[in-house]
Amino acid sequence: MARRMDYLPIFFKISQKQCLVVGGGDVALRKINLLLKSGAIVECIAPSFCQALLKCSADNALTLTKKTFEAVDIQNQSLLISATDNEALNAEVSRLAHDANIPVNVVDAPELSSFIMPSIVDRSPLLIAVSSGGKAPVLARIIRAKLETIVPSAYGRLAEIAGEYRGQVKSKFSHIKDRRLFWESVFSGNIAEKVFTGRIKEAKVDLERLLANTKAQELGEVYLVGAGPGDPDLLTFKALRLMQQADVVLYDRLVSDAVMELVRRDAELIYVGKKTGGQSSRQSDINKRLVELAKSGKRVCRLKGGDPFIFGRGGEEIETLSENGISFQVVPGITAASGCSTYSGIPLTHRDYSQSCRFVTAHLKDGTCDLPWGEFVAEQQTIVFYMALSGAKHLSGKLIEHGMRKNMPIALIEKGTTPEQKVYTTTLSGIPELLDKEDIHAPTLMIVGEVVKLREKLNWYAN
Ligand code: SAH
């Protein structure tokens, strides 16, 4: 048999009801704030009040009564909370409340309480309450914090909108099963995404269409998502949410296996990176594919290593989408420069060594590497070269030729932020020798600047 529940979880409508809080300290204040937020009319009785509570007394729904608690005070109250550090008083409030059948909570004393207060995630009108039945409040708080991170803040807005249409939906679908299907498609599809990204009007139009059943073929949506440099812990909450609801995921070799593990299990996976030894898919083919998939109604996640807008050609992909009237959203990711710098203990700026930082691609569209070399030789700056591995010798030659000092510190970071991360440090003139000696693989990032020396002190990532 299932374990008996110690409590009945309910949500109590307290709006416009008279409630009494005994105690005038910080704890009482927290409870009072909750009660006021729920629309209660609160009286607080205590011989003295903390400063913060005195400040709240401007609230019309709160009365502070300076006196000691007496039995008559519980008259006409719908709910009692005792938040004092006087055990005898707490017990007295509890006893009186039980005798009078008024719900009572004594803070931190479940044995004296007829109800206990959960930890909450407030996305009003959506409310999530977590309780350990008073056995492990810290555990409940930890779970609450986890929920806080996975429930998008806009869920409240979504619930609000659902509330507006509830009646209409009910009269249109008499069977509960049909209603459920309707709401499922609203909450996990494009309509919800539109609400999350603030496109409320569009969302309502779509919802009304869905309700009237007049919508033509539904268009899908494309999420251009930054997957970060490799460590899955560096994903954003939004990236994770979209990865887990996509029907199709297009990815390339820069997206780490650990990140791919987090994609929805039954999503279709399409690899669009380099085949072993071969050519990578043409960008125009990828752009076209995204459009076709979205047009067929799919939710498409295009996962990009790092940040889609930093050497990620994200701009080109969404340009095609926009030309085809496909809706899309872009989620930033941690770019390789940021991930590799932190995981190698090399700050990109430092008050003593570098006041600016520049991200440079060592690989231009036409395959050349024609860069403004002269600008890179100044001191007190950091240059981060992306796609630098294959042209590293050429790069070091060019920098020396244009006057960068030969002992400029250099770091090469291979597979940064992953368990296979390797960091090689050398100097500008030492690059050819390093490359001859070591077997370094892509993806590798090059950091040029005095900041590289800080690694000796600041390296923290042991993989
Ligand atoms: N949009 C990506 C960059 C794509 S260009 C971002 O914002 O990070 C590809 C280059 O990024 C690689 O050639 C390499 O220089 C760098 N790179 C990406 N991930 C990396 C990693 N985990 N470690 C080292 N370099 C990385």
Image (spheres, rainbow, N blue to C red):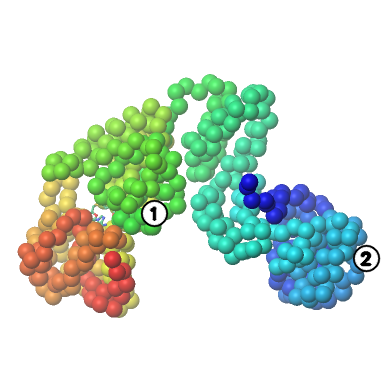
Q: Residues within 10 Å of mark 1 (few under 14, many from 20)?
A: many
Q: Amino acid at mark 1?
A: Leu
Q: Residue at x 35, y 48 (%)?
A: 261
Q: Position of residue 136 (x, y in %)?
A: 61, 64
Query: What residue is at 42 percent from the left and 49 percent from the top?
Result: 240
Quadrant of the displayed image that contains ligand 1: bottom left
For label 1, the SS is loop
Callout 2, which amino acid? Val
The one nearer the camera, 397 or 303, is: 303
Residue matched to label 1:
235
* 176 sits left or right of 431 in the view: right
Q: Quadrant of the C terminus?
A: bottom left
Q: Which mark is residue 64?
A: none
Instruction: Residue at the far right: name it.
Output: 72
Residue 336: x and y in percent read 28, 58
Instruction: Report which residue position mark 2 lands on.
Output: 72
Q: CA distance from mark 1 to mark 2?
A: 57 Å
